[in-house]
Amino acid sequence: MLDKSNAFFYYRMKKSLFYKFFPPPVFLRMPSVGFDISDQAIRFVEIIETRKGFVIGKYGFRNIAPGVIIGGEIKNTEELKKVLSSIHQEHNIDFANVSLPEQQSYLLTINVLTMKQSEIRGSLELQLEEYVPISMGDATFDYDIVNSSHKDKEHMELSLAAVPRTVAESYTSIFEHTGIMPIAFEVEAQAVARSIIPRGDKGTYMIVDFGKTQTGISIVSEETVVFTSTLNIGGSSLTKAIEKQFGVSTEEAENIKKEKGFLKNEETQEMFLVLMSTVSILKDEINKHYIYWNTHLDQDGGKRPKVEKVFMCGSDSNLTGFIDFVLPGLKTEIELGNAMVNVNTFDRYIPEIEFGDSLSYATAIGLALRPSE
């Protein structure tokens, strides 16, 4: 049982962290804001309900100084509070749905013996360490029933997620005295899926979220995130490689990366080789996860549904030639995700965020789309 100091956080977690990301459509009673907190920046997006549907309101980002957050772990609380306070003061944002770092979280599907819903939490408390490497006393967790009518009738499928209590408490505390009240917390992969996968689509997809410092790989099936993995490779790795190879500044390296990307010709041969060596691990990992999912049996010995499509998103996912280089040979369709697909249709509304920029706002958009309760 959580003590009183954790009760408020627990309530938010219970209501949001493992909320199925495609509930029945509801109308938002007030603007909803998503805060995507990463190692390098905070991105925020406000979604407003209008007569023509959802539209984008306030949005933007704030860079975070190096070392304030490392690998999703907050190292400098006061500095982060200053950034949040400045966003509150400039944009008058009072409430937000907030991301939790995927690399500090555990999200998986498990099969358990069929039981009454009132018995599930108690059962998981006794077995938590069988599923995640965190003791019950050091964890905050919740679950969602994915499939209560399991084919053998003796089991039920749950989506289980857990975060270390210290991580949960650190993300709660950074909002104190900033003027912003966190309404809900959610793992990044769940928020990205809500923005990228069309609402109501029950297919099976892979999402590759290529961010600045890391890449998140997830599998979404039957409207549920069933697998996640995080790699410490991102767009900044490409920038640093260009800096080192050509002896240019960070700003110049960023411009070169965006201008030339993965184009391969005589003029860009050296550039291509630098980028290729940097992302080769990413390429191999994506291919490995894709093959594993499509060829291995599920927990019951049955065939898994095949990945129908791979969606790319993230700040550098639209670099010229990136998709063709990183994802060759996959026997499925590959495309850049549309982070606005569940906001509105382009024939009714032209969003303020350009398509290329929206790829870096996928997490924030997904958080803002989370229905109020």
Image: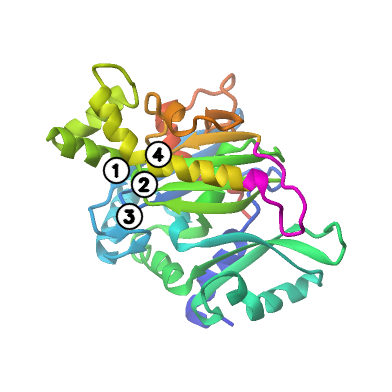
Q: Please give the residue where the numbered disc 1 appears in the rendered image.
A: 237
Does the image show residue 232?
Answer: yes
Q: Marks 2 and 4: which is nearer the front?
A: 2
Q: Residues within 10 Å of mark 3 (few under 14, many from 20)?
A: many
Mark nearest the camera among 2 and 3 is 2
Q: Is residue 30 visible?
A: no
- The mark closer to the camera, 3 or 1, is 1
Marks 2 and 3 in Cβ contact (< 8 Å):
no
Residue lying farthest to the top in this orientation:
266
Instruction: Identify residue type, mark 4.
Output: Tyr
| Chain-order first, disc 2 or disc 4 | 4
Q: Amino acid at mark 2?
A: Ile
Which residue type carries mark 1? Ser
| Tag 2 residue | 233
Task: Specify start and end residues of the magenta stretch as a single range.
Answer: 293-307
Question: Can you identify the residue that label 3 sits on?
Answer: 84
In primary-sequence order, the first of circles 2 and 3 is 3
Q: Residue 125 location in percent, x, y?
A: 64, 78
| Between marks 1 and 4 in the image, the one whose residue lies nearer the viewer | 1
CB atoms at circles 2 and 4 under 8 Å apart? no
Residue 270 percent across, percent down from the top left: 23, 27
Determine whether label 1 and label 2 are within 8 Å by CB.
yes
Secondary structure found at label 3: helix
What is the quadrant of the C terminus in the image? Answer: bottom right
Residue that numbered label 4 is attached to: 59
Residue 322 placement, left or right of 350: left
Q: Residue at x 27, y 34 (%)?
A: 274
Of residue 296 and residue 9, the one placed in the foreground of this image is: 296
Which residue is drawn at the image coordinates 55% and 67% (left, top)? 162
Residue 111 at what x, y percent from top left?
73, 64
